[in-house]
Image (spheres, rainbow, N blue to C red):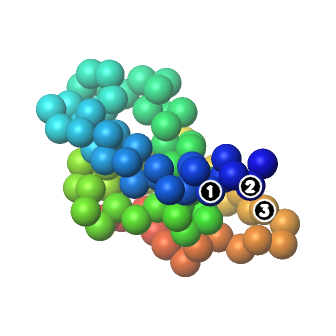
Amino acid sequence: NSENLRAALNNLDFHIQYFNYLLNSKNYFIKDDLTYLDFLAAANFSVLDYLGLLNLKDYENIKEWYFKIKSRPSFKPLLKDQIVGLNPHENYKIIDI
């Protein structure tokens, strides 16, 4: 449904602000230790990153968190995935802040 997609894109910045807020006092989402939730969230952020919809310029907490997970050896195979007919955004393979 294109209306749902439009609404999601319109609310994307609000949700990223909220995730940024959640990381104000912690290294990861639930506590200072990496959990499955962080990998789940990072995989979803990776989709936005692939499409070029992830602008972290104003969100330092998310930026640090995402690049910390994105640069992990266990996450690198995900960055090799490709969608046929849709090239990743130029920033997608950058793994360092």
Tell me the element at label 3.
loop
Camera-side residue: 67 or 8? Answer: 8
Name, please, the residue furthest toward the left: 25
**Could you tell me the amino acid type at mark 3?**
Ile
Residue underneath mark 1? 6
Of residue 94 and residue 62, the one placed in the foreground of this image is 62
User: How far apart, in angstroms, are the residues tagged by discs 3 and 1?
Assistant: 21 Å
Determine the CA span between mark 3 and mark 2.
Answer: 20 Å
Q: Write down the residue under mark 2.
A: 2
- Counting from the top left corner in percent of width and height, residue 52 is at 55, 69
Residue occupying the point 47% across, 26% down: 37
**Left or right of residue 29, residue 42 in this image:** right
Question: In the image, what residue type sits under mark 2?
Answer: Ser
Q: Which of marks 3 and 1 is in front?
A: 1
The reply to whether discs 3 and 1 touch (Cβ–Cβ < 8 Å) is no
- Of residues 22 and 39, the one nearer the viewer is 22
